[in-house]
Image (tube, coloured by chain):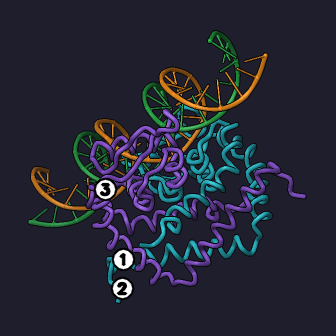
Chain colours: A cyan, B purple, C orange, D green
Amino acid sequence: MRTFERSLPMSLLKAREAVMKKFIPHLRAHDLSPQQWRVLRALYDDPKGMEMSVLSERCFLLMPSLSRIVQNLEARQLISRRTADHDQRCSIISLDQLGHELVEVMAPESEARYAHITQVFGYGKLELLYELLDELVEKLEEADKSPLGETS
Amino acid sequence: MRTFERSLPMSLLKAREAVMKKFIPHLRAHDLSPQQWRVLRALYDDPKGMEMSVLSERCFLLMPSLSRIVQNLEARQLISRRTADHDQRCSIISLDQLGHELVEVMAPESEARYAHITQVFGYGKLELLYELLDELVEKLEEADKSPLGETS
DNA sequence: AGAAAATATATAACATGTTAAGTTTAAGTT
DNA sequence: AACTTAAACTTAACATGTTATATATTTTCT
């Protein structure tokens, strides 16, 4: 059997943890989880707001998690929600002034940490890594269509 | 500000999800979570068993999570624990016969799925990805020693 | 129009992730 | 030897991940 060390899910997890470690202290200093920050960050890019389901895709969060996160951020007045005119089922989430300010306050430090990672790892390698990750996802999802073990 | 799409943590997360999707159905068919499988797999490689803290490192699980998982697997008689002779604080966890059999039953299918991933993505790219991920972790942990934003 | 299917989101229930605090045993100090 | 500190887990508490189910609204069908 393949050695346990070479586990792709674990390697990806470890890399993610190592990267997150660079951001978490800054996030914690502002009482935000990585997920909450993703939500604020996504909303910042789209001032007119968006539906829960769209936000869910952008942030790569499942609806139940997003639902809880939105409730939290709403209670903190960082975001607000309104019912969509065209469809009473939809909530439109948008960034409140407080949330907008928070993103702008935090962004420089966040960018600096990104720059730091780029610098220690190397720009070229980082780009290559992004490409490989994207391609891996693409190939695996492609293969999902013709289900699985068909190794022929 | 950098575009929200290019988020390293999210790219790593997405890749991990895509990979896991290939394994989860098989695991679920045997009532195992990915974490539970990691524990069984690690113990399989070391028949004499190991301490919780070692298991924790090997499986990249924090102690509280591992503690719960071990309780679950113990209740299912897949593993067993005994107190270490040299130190009453340590639990030595080892694979029970039932657990050993389960790993051997599941391993072929698991290996087949690994082979499938290797095939659709390409062996060379997979190796390159592993190398990049390892190097990223290494560089980031190195940088941890001289804390952060020192971009000079 | 009225019933049935689909959609958008919420809630429930339980496993895991994560930080902090508690327990028991070992090691070090004086 | 008594006291303190440290180490190995465990438990607690709460956020998130994940699947299943519920609820409200739209759409579709007839």
- Residue A102 figure quarter: top right
CA neighbours of label 3 inside 10 A, class few (<14), some (14 to 19), many (20+): many
Q: Which mark is residue B85?
A: none
Q: Secondary structure at mark 1?
A: helix
Q: Give the residue type at disc 2.
A: Thr
Of the image marks 3 and 1, the number of the one nearer the N terminus: 3
Quarter containing the C terminus of chain B: bottom right
CA neighbours of label 1 inside 10 A, class few (<14), some (14 to 19), many (20+): some
The location of residue B47, given as percent across then percent down, is: 41, 58
In the picture provided, is B21 more to the left or to the right than A125? left
- What residue is shown with label 2? A151
Q: Could you say which is closer to the camera, residue C1 or residue A38? A: A38
Q: Which mark is residue B99?
A: 3
Marked residue chain, label 1: B
- Cβ atoms at labels 1 and 2 below 8 Å apart: yes
Residue at image point 63% right, 62% down: B8
